[in-house]
Amino acid sequence: MQYRAEKAGYMASYGECGHEIIEQDGEAIGRWWVHSTDLKIRLVDIRIAPKAQRRGVGTELLRELQGGATRPILLSVAIDNQLARQLYGRLGFVQIDQTGMHIHMEWRPVVMEAVAGGR
């Protein structure tokens, strides 16, 4: 039921989202939702099981997403989620806003940074 409620919420907010189960050694250890448009990629949600956290899984997934990105990646993270905020910071995400209990972050591909810097 929780999955269906989350899916309905994400669909209402973002439309069609890509959803993947994250597996390691044949075992489901998490999942993530990604929404892409022509202008941006939004990491809607990512969850890694506690037993699989702090083992590089999130870093690997985010680097894979960044590696193929030609547009900004946006995400939101709870203010009190220090570990996730540190991970995003290490991967080059910067805070662009804060609303309520969430920090909104953005990462821009190098190609975009070069274009923006040349203006």
Image (cartoon, rainbow, N blue to C red):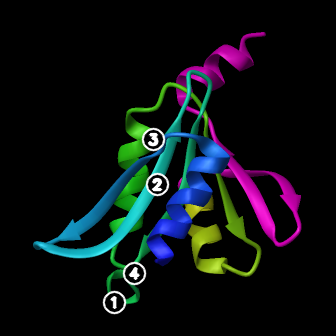
Measured Cα–Cα span from mark 4 to mark 1? 6 Å
Sooner in the amino-acid sequence: mark 2 or mark 3: 2
* In-front residue for pair 70/33: 33
Residue 74 seen in the figure: no
* Residue projecting furthest to the top: 119
Q: Where is mark 3, residue-wise?
A: 66
Identify the residue at image location x=78%, y=10%. Answer: 119
Q: Assess disc 1: are there few (<14), some (14-19) or many (≥20) residues with their C-alpha within 10 Å of its C-alpha.
A: few
Do labels 4 and 1 touch, CB within 8 Å? yes
Residue 115 is left or right of residue 70, and the answer is right
Q: Assess disc 4: are there few (<14), some (14-19) or many (≥20) residues with their C-alpha within 10 Å of its C-alpha.
A: some
Q: Secondary structure at mark 4?
A: loop
Q: Which mark is residue 96?
A: none
Q: Position of residue 59 (x, y in %)?
A: 41, 61
Q: Secondary structure at mark 3?
A: helix
Q: Where is mark 2, residue-wise?
A: 33
Measured Cα–Cα span from mark 1 to mark 3? 25 Å
Measured Cα–Cα span from mark 2 to mark 3? 15 Å
Q: Where is mark 4, residue-wise?
A: 53
Q: Assess disc 3: are there few (<14), some (14-19) or many (≥20) residues with their C-alpha within 10 Å of its C-alpha.
A: many
Above or below residue 9? Residue 5 is below
Sooner in the amino-acid sequence: mark 1 or mark 2: 2
Residue type indicated by callout 3: Gln
Do labels 1 and 2 touch, CB within 8 Å? no
Q: Which mark is residue 51?
A: 1
Magenta stretch, residue numbers: 91-119
Residue type indicated by callout 1: Lys
Q: Quadrant of residue 90?
A: bottom right
Sooner in the amino-acid sequence: mark 1 or mark 3: 1
